[in-house]
Image (spheres, rainbow, N blue to C red):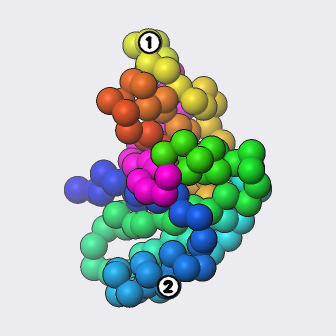
Amino acid sequence: MSALISHVGIAVRDLDAAIEKYRALLGCEPVSVHDVPDQQVRAAFFDRANSRLDSGGRVELLQATSPDSPIARFIAKRGEGLHHICIYVDDLPETLARLKSSGRRLIDEVPRIGADGHRIAFVHPADTHGVLFELEER
Ligand code: CO
């Protein structure tokens, strides 16, 4: 059985300071730190190397790189904290079409490329009881 959750995304003001804290909390190093120009964010992914667990359940820290970034707007409105939960889907265009035809509000109607190079799309939190969901194609 494969993992349901790819990662949780946490909005932070200062990525370097957050990495220090999460390194101690999670007991592992960030496996990648990179800019996602498309989203105007800098992202750090924590995962355990050589994990015997299926790939999943990672932690993504997100810092805005511009005042127009969705992360900057999120922090201005709600402060730092849990920003989104990312779940795996097998076929993203098919999943988006199914959600759309059942009347769900989508932030992305077509897939785009996410922080770690996979196809992703966001579902509007108004339709998921206040939680922003990211869908990631395996
Ligand atoms: Co994410």
Q: Which residue is located at x 43 percent, y 40 percent?
A: 133
Q: Is residue 107 visible?
A: yes
At mark 2, the secondary structure is: helix
Spatial CA span between label 1 and label 2: 42 Å
Residue in front for this viewpoint, 108 or 42: 42
| Residue 118 quadrant | bottom right
Q: Which residue is the site of mark 2? A: 20
Of residues 88 and 126, the one nearer the viewer is 126
Query: Mark 2 near ligand 1 (CB under 8 Å)?
Result: no
Q: Where are the magenta residues, as a range?
A: 79-98
Question: Is label 1 in a helix, a strand or a loop?
Answer: loop
Three-letter residue code for mark 2 = Glu
Residue 36 against residue 50 in the figure, above or below: above
Position of 2 with respect to 114 (left or right) is left
Does the stretch in magenta take in 127?
no
Instruction: From the viewer's perspective, tell me whether residue 112 is left or right of residue 28.
Output: right
In the image, residue 57 above or below residue 103? below
* Residue at the spot of label 1: 103
- The amino acid beneath tag 1 is Gly
* Position in image of residue 48 (x %, y %): 38, 81
Q: Is residue 104 left or right of residue 73?
A: left
Position in image of residue 129 (x %, y %):
32, 30
